[in-house]
Image (spheres, coloured by chain):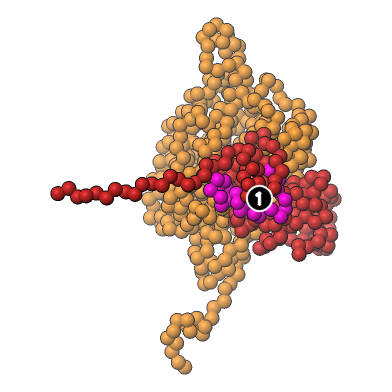
């Protein structure tokens, strides 16, 4: 038996085959039901093919068989962790075609609720991300504790904890409860600030955390843009694309906030961007509460008196009513004809609705641009060359919600 | 002794043409020899144009690579059913010039074949698969055109207006045991 010296020769003698490993769909770290077909060379991933569709509910078909008003209640289910953003995108699209002017107070309330929802989503992501990395020490309980607090805030406003159905055509469901803004502001400026620092104290410089997250899952900015990746994933790759700053919708141009951008573009960078977004979202909510037209609870009679007595506030009376014209939109609300693409910055990226209306009470075509769909598509590029254990960390860092992928 | 500093060469005036503004994309394509039908603006004042099927790839390539347009971001690919046929709608956006344009291409219902643009924007890969899955538009040249959201041998295309959903999805015949009716009725891309 001769000793093989040439390494190329060695590979021919000891030929290894790639192994195909099926991961999911019932896998605890796939955030729902995602199936990955991994081609493994030893432990290294050579090829990855995501298989999606296990949570397909036909949201587009459902929308095209319901009236605009009926569909309002369903859209929260597209991305169940960011129901406010879903509603906001759909309602904005319908309002743009119908030409409905939304009261200023309702726009502010929409922003407050959307940003609170962003904090909820990021907190859940943070807990699950640490769990996926193996932090079984109870880190998720800290984030879930704070998530519970915000969920009860939003429950007071909308009556629901996840499927809010709060943002409606022409405004919002109803006004904020009495004393709500003071409570939220107090919690965000004191407790929440402390809690975010606590998360950072536990995780950010933890050597085990750094060993699991640094220098893996690099995302090339050009590829990410070509793949349509948006949100914190894209911003962690150095592309400053946040619709709240880039093309401000609603009243986002009224607030001072930073968009965290990192050029490191690995898993750790995505973590840092989201942690910073927690702080920025809290800052936006506090600013919006300070600027909220009409104050804590709108007292229309008092404001009317203030308008007529010459003590003129900066806004008009019609800016105050939370619903346009002060009444609900009837179920036979007709829209169009017209076509629009309206997008909001959801916690996961650019969430848009392409709505084609033909003038009837039923949408002719609704197409959802869900950010997770693109974020899953880039996964096969990100995991190439990393071990299987890193697939979980990389996938978790993308913050994908499978109902949002499958719609 | 003061060193003689070399003067930097004068900067040539920038040769890059000014970016196209809204409403000029149709004229821009025409100047490159591509006929397009203007469809006006949408409710968000984004220009919409319709091009011929044979010009789709060329016009997308122009919009992506030319210095005037620089559409580096395919925001969305929508499939729409109209009376005259199926439509594939591309919403393009430029992160450099912050402009958007919507390109539409219509194909007949008998022969719904659209050339793929997945080599221009990688995101079109999955979008075209979804459009094929839901509306039955066939993207010629696509590297991996198969169903993405529905099971592989689902019958029919759910977002078509003449689609009849299964009577009882839970207790009816299992979709995996059915024949591929859709494959028979549609002609395959040549």
The spot of residue A363 in percent (x, y) is: 75, 38
Category of crowding for the residue at label 1, using alpha-carbon neighbours closer than 10 angstroms: few (below 14), some (14–19), many (at least 20) = few
The residue under the point 58% across, 23% down is A105
Residue labelled with disc 1? B33
The answer to whether residue A291 of the structure is visible from this angle is yes
The answer to whether residue A369 of the structure is visible from this angle is no
Residue A221 lies within the magenta run: no
Q: Which chain is red?
A: B
**Side (left or right) of B120 relative to B166:** left
Element at label 1: loop
**Side (left or right) of A207 relative to B169:** left
In which chain is the residue bearing label 1? B
Q: Nearer the viewer, residue B160 or A294?
A: B160
Residue B64 lies within the magenta run: yes
Chain A colour as displayed:
orange
Q: Nearer the viewer, residue B134 or A330?
A: B134
Count of picture labels: 1
The residue under the point 41% across, 47% down is B12
The spot of residue A129 in percent (x, y) is: 51, 51
- B52 above or below A188? below
Q: Nearer the viewer, residue A148 or A283?
A: A283
The residue under the point 57% across, 41% down is B20
Q: Which residues are magenta?
A: B49-72
- A91 above or below A78? above
Instruction: Return the residue found at the far bottom.
Output: A1
The residue under the point 67% across, 57% down is B116
Instruction: Return the residue found at the far top.
Output: A309
């Amino acid at each position: 038996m001769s000793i093989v010296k040439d390494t190329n020769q060695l590979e021919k003698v000891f030929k290894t085959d790639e192994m195909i490993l099926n991961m999911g769909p019932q896998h605890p770290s796939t955030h729902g039901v995602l199936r990955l077909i991994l081609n493994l060379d030893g432990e290294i991933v050579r090829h990855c093919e995501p298989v999606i569709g296990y949570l397909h509910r036909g949201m587009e078909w459902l929308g095209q068989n319901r009236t605009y008003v009926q569909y309002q209640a369903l859209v929260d289910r597209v991305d169940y962790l960011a129901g406010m953003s879903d509603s906001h995108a759909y309602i904005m699209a319908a309002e743009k075609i119908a030409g409905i002017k939304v009261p200023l107070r309702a726009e502010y309330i929409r922003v407050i609720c959307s940003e609170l929802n962003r904090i909820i989503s990021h907190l859940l992501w943070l807990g699950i991300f640490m769990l996926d990395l193996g932090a079984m020490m109870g880190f998720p309980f800290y984030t879930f504790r704070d998530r519970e607090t915000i969920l009860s805030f939003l429950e007071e406003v909308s009556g629901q904890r996840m499927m809010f159905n709060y943002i409606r055509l022409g405004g919002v469901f109803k006004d904020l409860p009495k004393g709500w803004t003071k409570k939220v502001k107090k919690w965000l400026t004191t407790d929440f600030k402390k809690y975010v620092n606590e998360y950072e104290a536990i995780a950010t410089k933890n050597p085990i955390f750094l060993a699991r997250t640094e220098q893996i899952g690099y995302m090339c900015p050009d590829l990410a843009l070509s793949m349509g990746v948006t949100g914190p994933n894209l911003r962690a790759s150095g592309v400053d694309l946040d619709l709240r700053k880039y093309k401000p919708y609603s009243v986002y141009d009224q607030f001072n906030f930073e968009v965290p951008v990192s050029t490191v573009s690995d898993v750790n960078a995505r973590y840092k961007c989201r942690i910073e977004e927690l702080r920025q979202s809290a800052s936006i909510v506090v600013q919006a509460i300070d600027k909220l037209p009409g104050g804590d609870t709108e007292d229309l009679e008092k404001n009317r008196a203030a308008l007529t007595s010459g003590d003129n506030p900066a806004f008009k009376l019609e800016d105050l009513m939370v619903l346009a014209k002060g009444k609900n939109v009837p179920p036979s609300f007709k829209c169009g004809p017209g076509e629009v693409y309206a997008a909001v910055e959801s916690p996961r990226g650019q969430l848009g609705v392409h709505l084609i209306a033909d003038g009837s009470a039923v949408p002719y075509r609704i197409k959802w641009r869900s950010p997770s769909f693109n974020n899953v598509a880039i996964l096969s590029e990100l995991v190439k060359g990393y071990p299987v254990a890193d697939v979980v960390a990389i996938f978790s860092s993308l913050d994908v919600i499978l109902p949002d992928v499958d719609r | 002794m003061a060193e003689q500093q070399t003067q930097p060469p004068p900067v040539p005036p920038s040769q890059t043409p000014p970016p196209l503004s809204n409403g000029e994309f149709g004229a821009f394509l025409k100047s490159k020899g591509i006929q397009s039908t203007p469809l006006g603006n949408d409710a968000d004042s984004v220009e919409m144009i319709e091009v011929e099927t044979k010009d789709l790839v060329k016009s997308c390539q122009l919009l992506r690579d030319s210095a005037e347009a620089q559409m580096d971001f395919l925001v969305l690919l929508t499939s729409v059913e109209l009376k005259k046929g199926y439509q594939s709608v591309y919403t393009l956006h430029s992160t450099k010039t912050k402009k958007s344009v919507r390109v539409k291409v219509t194909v007949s219902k008998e022969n719904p074949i659209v050339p793929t643009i997945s080599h221009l924007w990688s995101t079109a890969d999955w979008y075209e698969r979804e459009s094929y899955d839901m509306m039955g538009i066939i993207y010629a040249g696509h590297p991996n055109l198969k169903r993405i959201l529905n099971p592989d041998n689902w019958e029919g295309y759910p977002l078509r207006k003449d689609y009849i959903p299964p009577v009882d999805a839970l207790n009816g015949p299992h979709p995996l045991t059915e024949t591929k009716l859709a494959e028979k009725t549609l002609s395959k891309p040549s």
